[in-house]
Amino acid sequence: MKKMYVLFALGTCLLANAQVTEMRPLPQITVSGEGKVKVVPDQALISVSVETKGSNATDVKKQNDETVDRVLQSIKKYKLPKEDVQTKRISLNPQFDYQKKKYNYNATNTIEIFLKDLSQYDAIMETLVDAGINRISAVEFRSSKIEQLKSDARKKAMLDAKLKAEDYVSVLNQKVGKALNISDNSQVYFPQPVLYQTKMARAEVMDAALPEETIAVGEIEIHATVNVSFQLD
């Protein structure tokens, strides 16, 4: 009986020590790391619109359709894939003129072009303007390698975090162990194109600035930031 009591007491003591060990926080260090990758865009998503105004809804819609058809026909010579040229938004809205006490109508048709060859950009934009588009809603430059570049930036950020941790603990005669926690805060910065006036804008036909024959494309920057907690060995 006494022997069983001793074994029970010993087991209880070992269990208590194990619980204390589990509750004791692991020695660790938390650092941040940054990784940046830059690349010149090789693609662009172009959003352009044809706007037509007038006093007769039927005539306005007809004129708008004719201009849009002319625009679509004009860019066929560039042999873009059909799925890369899409009509996105079509609208016909009445607008009441309080001075003349009557309605006018505004028809808008928006076309999106996904351009995979930026060497065609200048020529296509000039063709679009000549064919009748009168608003450029947006030009977003992209890269065909964006996913690989994001991966490269994340790896650089993790390497930066590990090097920082090793610098800190090197003076303590400790080593950086496995990662216990990782949080990511990555971002992609796209260049904003500068849109210049064309001959149509100078003729006051357009109410928005449009590009000339050349543009400054700039660079896409992928910026990865991570916070990492490493165990100390």
Image (spheres, grey):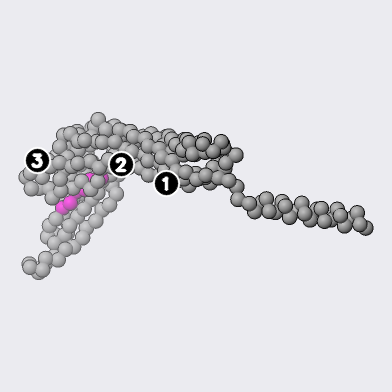
**Which quarter of the rendered picture does the N terminus lie within?**
bottom right
Q: Amino acid at mark 2?
A: Phe
Question: Circles 2 and 1: CB distance less than 8 Å?
Answer: no
Q: Secondary structure at mark 3?
A: helix
Circle nearer the N terminus (2, 3): 2
The residue to which callout 1 is attached is: 185
Residue 184, above or below 145? below
Which residue of the protein is positioned furthest toward the top in this rendering?
Answer: 119
Q: Is residue 217 above or below residue 59?
A: above
- Place of residue 150 in the rendered image (x, y in percent of width and height, measured from the top left): 41, 38
Q: Which residues are magenta?
A: 45-52
Sequence-wise, the earlier of marks 2 and 1 is: 1
Q: Is residue 34 left or right of residue 85?
A: right
Residue 150 can be seen, yes or no: no
Quadrant of res 84 = top left
Q: Nearest the camera: 51 or 29?
A: 29
Q: Residues under labels 1 and 3: Cα distance?
A: 44 Å
Report, in whole angstroms, how far the alpha carbon at label 2 lies from the one at label 3. 28 Å
- Left/right of residue 102 with respect to residue 150 in the rendered view: left
